Amino acid sequence: MQGREIRLAARPVGEPKPTDFALAEVEVPDPAEGELLVRNLVMSVDPYMRGRMNDVKSYVPPFQLDAALQGGAVGEVVESRSDSHAVGDLVLHMQGWRDYAVGPATTFRQVERTASPSHHLGILGMPGLTAYAGLFGVAGLQAGETVFISGAAGAVGSLAGQFARLRGAKVVGSAGSADKVRWLVEELGFDAAFNYRDAPVKDQLRTFAPDGIDAYFDNVGGDHLEAAIDVLKVHGRAAICGMISQYNNTEATPGPRNMSMIVGKRLVLRGFLVSDHGDLLPEFTREVGGWLADGKLVVRETVVDGLENAPEAFLGLLRGDNTGKMVVRIA
Ligand code: NAP
């Protein structure tokens, strides 16, 4: 059987280009004893993939040149040579960027048939747990506190803002367009939001959080982090989740200019990886699953059709084309 896969054709320098990717036709191997053959339905594009395209040592190994990319995907078992899975099971796994995945049954996790398979790549999956762990595990957000969330209209940010509101916090968000800002306030119920392109982040954050912020959920870094350090209250906490403003940089970026405030205000800035917070999964599933079932969450996705368009979806994610989770529908 033939299938298609997207390969890394060249390591991007700065902003990735379409020519850094290649679509290849491949022979799909038959599953061996203990393996599954899975037809992918939907795959994720995520900012961390940009880091894996560089040939540097990090918390995940770099992608290999001229080999299929990898990433979260949800598919349907079409052939099973393992007792653990049956044909028709819906599974979550890491062999995205291709039509068919073949591998040991232990690398595929069966998931429930929810409203959409893509929910396992967003609200009920990695971005959802990231938002939950960052807010409540890392930043220790409490009811009545004010949190600033950058990258607020993206997958993690839009969920973090809603979770914080549902737990009784006040939420200020930033995003890169007027439409996104309107969506945050009018549909997600953010207390305030601003477009970071309109004026310096520091000035806008001071305006929209005049009494300061207790916590900061950082998806962006750079001027957003500097603004947050400025506006955080004494004993404020920051969950440092990502720094997307720097992922395409080719040179080291200067840090925030106001680091000395960390001392006087006794701030805690803590980086985290979602993979360290699996212990929160049962609590996350119970609480967020409950909110979802009760219709208390707005779940928006930006869906790009066709595996061949996955590179464009990834480039679009880095440019801010998405509102909510960016996913690629494969079948
Ligand atoms: P996302 O927010 O859905 O998509 C990326 C967004 O980043 C874009 O939509 C764009 O929105 C914004 N952006 C791009 N360049 C920017 C810039 N220069 N300044 C400000 N915003 C910019 O992606 P996501 O999956 O939810 O990830 C959000 C962040 O969380 C990323 O930093 C990611 O690396 C991080 N993350 C960390 C973990 C972890 O375990 N620590 C796990 C998942 C994700 P605008 O239109 O608003 O610019």
Image (cartoon, rainbow, N blue to C red):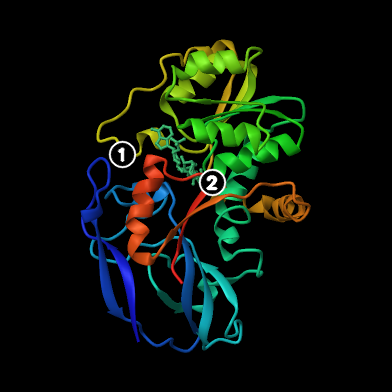
For the question of whether residue 187 can be seen, the reply is yes
**Quarter that holds the N terminus:** bottom left
Please tell me how crowded label 2 is: few (under 14), some (14-19), or many (20+) other residues with Cα within 10 Å. Answer: many
Q: Is residue 147 above or below residue 21?
A: above
Q: Is residue 269 above or below residue 122?
A: above
- Which is nearer the N-term, disc 1 or disc 2? 1
Q: Position of residue 155 (x, y in %)?
A: 54, 46
Q: Which mark is residue 248?
A: 1
Asked if ligand 1 lies within 8 A of label 1, the reply is no
Counting the numbered discs, the total is 2
Q: Position of residue 270 (x, y in %)?
A: 55, 32
Which residue is at the far top?
Answer: 264
- Left or right placement of residue 208 versus residue 16 in this view: right
Q: Which mark is residue 160?
A: none
Question: What residue type is disc 2 on?
Answer: Gly
Question: What residue type is disc 1 on?
Answer: Asn
Assign a secondary structure to mark 1: loop
Q: Position of residue 170 (x, y in %)?
A: 70, 27
Q: Residue at x 40, y 53 (%)?
A: 60
Q: CA distance from mark 1 to mark 2?
A: 21 Å
Query: In the rendered image, which residue does mark 2 sit on?
Result: 324
Q: Which of the two residues, 265 or 113, is positioned nearer the viewer here? A: 113
Q: Which of the two residues, 182 or 16, is positioned nearer the viewer here? A: 182
Rendered image quadrant of residue 157: top right
For the question of whether residue 58 can be seen, the reply is no
Q: Position of residue 216 (x, y in %)?
A: 58, 27
Q: Is residue 183 above or below residue 265?
A: below
Asked if ligand 1 lies within 8 A of label 2, the reply is yes
Assign a secondary structure to mark 2: loop
